Image (tube, rainbow, N blue to C red):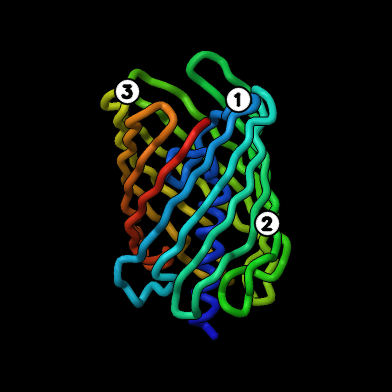
Amino acid sequence: MPDTVTFRCQIAAWLLIASGAAGAAQPLSSDDAQVQGAGRWQLEAGFQQSVPQSAAGGPPRTESTTLTRGLDERTDAYVSALHSRGSLGAGWGDLTLGLKWLLLEQGPFSLAFKPWLTLPTGNQWRGLGTGRVSAGALMAMQTEVGPLSLLANAGVVYQPTRWNQRQWLWQISSAVLYHVTDRLQLAIDTVVARNTQWGAKTNPAWVIAGVIYTPRPWIDLDVGYYHRLNDAAGPNMIMAGVALHW
């Protein structure tokens, strides 16, 4: 049973990353504070492949998909899903529905609020979901300093499960994106999240380094590397994705 719980916790963690970061600069965990704009669409697709490290557990591969629609100039709505391939088989995880409001935009500084609801559509017995409705919210701050974009996030999730785990979880992160050119960005993101296990003394922490390339205004391509900073975090992963805008 511990292996199953570990596997399912890793899926839940990636659901949080994929759903909470919809609209963010893939492949980062941190979200920016920007919205699409009225009538605009964005489709994000990415995958995460574990680097062999059996001690950490977790799914060898996950694929995430997020579709976002700009409802007006300050509000987005999105739906996000995660597909996993691991030792318990392959399948779709829980479905997440969310909103994103641009609360403040003043000069180079912007602030957004992002609530979401996760529905138990994944098979919990195969490690593809929690079997319970969960909800979360995120505050995303962003400021521009010359060629740098600085991001800071603070989020909380209520995630009930059938197992004896913490139900209230938090995650904080900060990221720096360096605009090398109009088409190329380098990024680094540091994240700390609350451990789901009662009595655990170490909270998972990880860092993501990535490159984002924009060959055309309507498409972004990205690659990244997720590196665990302690044993409580999931296995190291390589990441890649694409975002389409129209």
The residue depicted at 53 percent of the width and 80 percent of the height is: 4
Proximity of marks 1 and 2: CB atoms separated by less than 8 Å? no
Q: From mark 2 to mark 3, how far is it between C-alphas?
A: 36 Å
Q: Is mark 2 on a helix, strand or loop?
A: strand
Q: Mark 1 points at which residue?
A: 37
Q: In this view, does 38 lie to the left or right of 240?
A: right
Is residue 8 visible to the viewer in this orientation of the structure? yes
Amino acid bearing label 3: Asp
Q: Residues within 10 Å of mark 1 (few under 14, many from 20)?
A: some
Determine whether the residue tagged by mark 1 lies in a helix, strand or loop: loop
Q: Which amino acid does label 1 sit on?
A: Gly
- Relative to 34, say whether 173 is above or below: below
Say which of marks 1 and 2 sits in front.
Answer: 1
Q: How many marks?
A: 3
Instruction: Tell me what residue is drawn at x 49 percent, y 44 percent.
Output: 44
Give the Cα distance between marks 1 and 2: 24 Å
- What x and y, as percent, mark residue 64? 50, 55
Q: Where does the image place residue 156, in percent across and percent down from the top left? A: 62, 50
Which of the two discs, 2 and 3, labels the residue nearer the N terminus? 2
Q: Residue 119, image x and y in percent?
A: 70, 60
Calculate the distance from the C-alpha at mark 3 to the C-alpha at mark 1.
21 Å
Name the residue tied to disc 2.
118
- Mark 3 or mark 1: whose residue is earlier in sequence: 1
Residue 240 percent coordinates (x, y): 36, 50
Residues under numbered marks 2 and 3 in contact, where contact means CB atoms less than 8 Å apart? no
Q: In this view, does 88 lie above or below 136?
A: below
Sequence-wise first label, 1 or 2: 1
Identity of the residue drawn at 58% across and 34% down: 41
- Horizontal side of 115 relative to 229 (left or right) equals right
Residue flagged by tag 2: what amino acid is it?
Thr
Q: Residue furthest top?
A: 107
Residue behind mark 3: 182
